[in-house]
Image (tube, coloured by chain):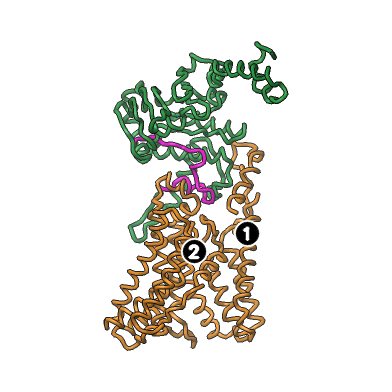
Amino acid sequence: MSMTQHADPAVTTPPAPGSKETDGRTAQRSLALRLLARPEVGVFLGAVAVLVFFLITAPPVRDGGAMANILYQSSTIGIMALPVALLMIGGEFDLSAGVAVITSALTASMISYQLTMNVWVGVIVALAVSLGIGFFNGWMLVKTGLPSFLVTLGTFLILQGANLAITKWVTGNVATDDISNMDGFSQAKALFASSFEVGGVQVKITIVWWLVFAALATWVLLRTKYGNWIFAVGGNKESARAVGVPVTFTKISLFMLVGFGAWFVGMHNLFSFNTVQSGEGVGQELIYIAAAVIGGCLLTGGYGSAIGPVFGAFMFGMVQQGIVYAGWNPDWFKAFLGVMLLGATLINLWVRQTATRR
Amino acid sequence: MTTPHGAVLKDTEPAQDRPIVELRGAGKSYGNIRALHGVSLAVHPGKVTCVLGDNGAGKSTLIKIVSGLHQHTEGEFLVDGEPVRFTTPREALDRGIATVYQDLATVPLMPVWRNFFLGSEMTKGPWPIRRLDIAAMKKTADHELREMGIVLDDLEQPIGTLSGGQRQCVAIARAVYFGARVLILDEPTAALGVKQSGVVLKYIAAARDRGLGVIFITHNPHHAYMVGDHFSVLRLGTLELSASRDQVSLEELTNHMAGGAELAALKHELSQVRGVDVDELPEEDDLTAPVAGTEGKA
């Protein structure tokens, strides 16, 4: 897809130059067209459309509490969609992201409860484990040269099995024990799973984290060396290596960033529900990837934004909750998502082609 | 000369005649296969050295040695008169030897200015908030590109939207800016149209005029003769011809390039074959056509 995208202009340009002395090699494209060429604009319009649709068809959505709930739902997807999107821009994707969230939560829970320690010990160990999983994924990818699909599919299966087996072995149950009365629980809950009141509406703290992370990711992506490298390793790994970009470091650190996201969401799950079901998380990885793709990230890498996935995740949260508020059969949720994913991808493709064509 | 490293003038000025890069009887064997043997080559500042040869003549092996991808197994390789043996392309780069590969130069979806500074980005600010100095990078990229005669009005456009020749030129400008003293161009015109090739040749001349030594690898003697100061023709891993511009004409160069005597022998063989089976070899007419004037059709 990306090949034809940039092959096209190269073919059409030769007759264009005309007078080489002036700056007028290309006609300046209109502001609207240049805006449309941004990766996040398509999904922004999509998100607005979905929002308006549900505001009209589902009156309860107009309530502030409902909106806070929708945003909360979006944030739990959105926090993970961010590093997944960065990884995708970097040319890879991670199928183990969904179960890695649960692995992280299980680790923190079991370390704290079984060893009767302050929950922060579990939280820190879980962070190390999550970063370790990310490192393993990245390292395997770089060392073996296998595609990330294969490497992370392996990790996905390993973690899925290990989650269940180790939890059963340690706790004798498929879920971990309630850790709500352990030392440090309330502190950790305040950080990962608290809520605060804004104008009579309870707002979950994850929404704040989501937006903070999104702002940070955008800044890193567009304004730092590292961000430049992410685009480069996803766009053309060999060229990037040839001009001195540390490709190995960039790829591995991106996987570790996904590990960090998995840790954060895992901690949120743990401290809001006090206990973790070991079989959960399967299928979530595809939701994150879908949010990133809807958000305008190119599946083949080298193109995308961090703001796009924010709107992508919002669309997911909106549809998920909107169906319920509209009183429809929630069984249709996934089907609705599929249609949305295809629609958004096609619109993105069309928008990008229209905007970049000259 | 506005190279940031300043190494250019310091090293080259005292000994203007000394070549920056020199090969003396260099060769390379892969196991028992001798890919290159007894090749001597000198690259002087402000001169274009053309390396010509058919496929498999050893051109690639030659540039791989100079650019640090492979090591020579015989002879000498000198940079600024001192023998060297590079183990990575990075070492070659540090000595000011930059290679512009035909397809390995840019990241298509990234803007021109980001491509220009990729891997050597300008930053400002202390660590936690150290960020790209975008204004400075755009300004520098624009200035450097103009210096090379490349005028782009929108440095934000993805470099993939530029034509192949322009992309190559950006890569050349980039190498020049980052302190290259010797520029190795690996068949820069091979995949380009006539007009595009002209553009690239123009920038090769521009780089030469800025005092760089250029190694121009090509299999097109016409392109080579337009900008070259010295011509080395490789054939089967050895030097078939090494002559400066005033010693050789385009016609001779083309002849050497085509394999001269070898082609005549080939033609002889072909005409014999033709005698055996005329109708089965329709393409033979094309093969013999350019030199056919003397022998005619048997």
Q: Amino acid at mark 1?
A: Leu
| Residue A336, picture quadrant | bottom right
Report the quarter where the N terminus of chain B lies: top left
Q: Is residue A20 left or right of residue B174?
A: right
The stretch in magenta equals B95-119
Q: Residue at x 55, y 67 (%)?
A: A290
What tint does the image give chain A? orange
Q: Is residue A88 magenta?
A: no
Q: Chain of mark 1?
A: A
Q: Amino acid at mark 2?
A: Ala
Q: Chain of mark 2?
A: A
* Residue B189 in view of the camera: yes
Circle 2 sits in a helix, a strand or a loop, which is it? helix
- Name the foreground residue: B47 vs B61: B61
Colour green belongs to chain: B
Reading the image, the residue beneath label 1 is A349
Reading the image, the residue beneath label 2 is A85
